[in-house]
Amino acid sequence: MADKMLDAKGLNCPLPILRAKKTLKEVPAGGTLEILATDPGSVADFAAFCRTTGNELVESSSDGGVYRFVIKHVA
């Protein structure tokens, strides 16, 4: 179970990333943030976000047009 959950369904780029960046600040170092999104571009966006911020993309999956990401907050 993630430490924090973000429902970004229905939002288009760049809003899921911007909301995730803001919410990640509320997650303790080593904690995880789970994000649900419907924007297909979010798959590439969250991979790039984790590469550039140093956070770890622990999980990425999709089910019926809903994309789920789990990001580990690295201090």
Image (spheres, grey):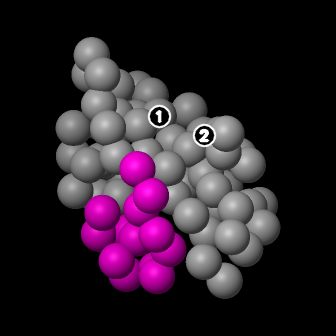
Q: Secondary structure at mark 2?
A: strand
Q: Amino acid at mark 2?
A: Leu
The dot on residue 6 is 2
| Residue 25 left/right relative to 46 | right
Between 19 and 3, the one lying in front of the other is 3
| Residue 26 left/right relative to 53 | right
State the image coordinates of residue 45 (x, y, percent, origin top left). Answer: 29, 58
43 shown above or below 58: above
Q: Which residues are magenta?
A: 47-59
| Residue 58 left/right relative to 66 | right
Q: Residue at x 50, y 74 (%)?
A: 55
Between 40 and 74, the one lying in front of the other is 74
Q: Upstream in the sequence, badge 2 or badge 1?
A: 2
Q: Quadrant of the C terminus?
A: bottom right
68 shown above or below 32: above
Q: Quadrant of the N terminus?
A: top right
Number of numbered markers: 2
The dot on residue 5 is none
Task: Tell me, yes or no, if residue 15 can be seen here.
Answer: no
State the image coordinates of residue 19 (x, y, percent, origin top left). Answer: 56, 51
Q: Amino acid at mark 1?
A: Leu
Magenta span has 56?
yes
The dot on residue 36 is 1
Q: Specify the quadrant of the image occupied by residue 11.
A: top left
Q: Secondary structure at mark 1?
A: strand
Real-space CA distance between mark 2 and mark 1, rounded to the nearest whole angstrom: 6 Å
Label pair 2/1, CB-CB below 8 angstroms:
yes
